[in-house]
Amino acid sequence: LSFAFDRTPLFNACQSSSWQRNLWVSTEFQRVVKSTGESLSSFLRPPRWIVVYRNEDIIFVSAFEANWLMGQLQSNKSSVTTLRLLLPRTKRVQSIFVNTPTLMIPPSIELPNTNMIYFIPIELLVQLFVFNGTLYFETLDEQIAYCQCLGLCPKPWTTKEEEAFENGWISIDGFVQKPKHRLQLQLNQARFPSNPLTFIKQLIETRNNSHPPITSHVGSIIFNSHKLL
């Protein structure tokens, strides 16, 4: 997934080995135009379409590739490879579509057993949220998984977390760096060994062409180190 940032100022900051290994970008999606003087936003394609391949790998594809795949997959009765639209949640009440069976291509609603439908698990979903610049969570579980992914322990704190902050385990921006401290604070899904907040702020600003509002769930976490849910 980190190759999406290749030849952009974000590549060195994205901590390329931190992303899940079954998250990919296609060569077409990755391709960028070298133009001197253009802003960073012109180099980063908006991630909207993904292919879930054999219910294992998630591949971001370009709009051109998505259009071609629609025709190929419409007649495909297999449920293990699907094309899906993934929207960043930039408003409080907004569907992101990616796990909606009727909107998958081919539609998974036609399957005889709903257990056959592959819903992207939340641990993977929040990495897609980071990648596409999502600003709001639908559930408390999404907020927890997002903070876990980034290694963050924002306020409000429990008594144990207050003590951890006083002992220097939690930085002022909520980041917990040492693995032993993460273990104690049950940050078991943290993926970034170094503080990713500068990268996250730049990425979200680039994706949305503006600073994330402090009143948004993600904005409050990355700027104020405070959870709103």
Image (cartoon, rainbow, N blue to C red):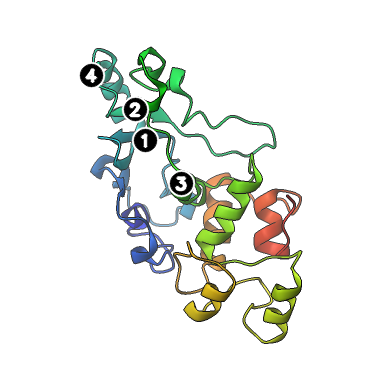
Who is closer to the viewer here, 91 or 177? 177
Q: Residue at x 45, y 73 (%)?
A: 193
Crowding near the residue tagged with mark 1, few <14, some 14–19, many ≥20 C-alpha atoms within 10 Å = many
Q: Which residue is mark 1?
A: 50
Q: As drawn, is 191 to the left or to the right of 184?
A: left
- Which amino acid lies under the numbered mark 1 shown in the image of this protein? Ile
Question: How much space separates mark 1 and mark 3, taking CA atoms?
Answer: 10 Å
Look at the numbered discs 1 and 3 and tell me whether their residues touch, using CB distance below 8 Å. yes
Q: Which residue is mark 3?
A: 128
Q: What is the tally of numbered marks visible in this picture? A: 4
Callout 1 secondary element: strand
Question: How much space separates mark 4 and mark 3, taking CA atoms?
Answer: 25 Å
**Residue 229 at x, y = what percent?**
73, 49
Q: Which residue is mark 4?
A: 72
Q: Residue at x 69, y 63 (%)?
A: 223
Tell me which label, 1 or 4, sits earlier in the chain. Answer: 1
Q: Which residue is mark 2?
A: 83
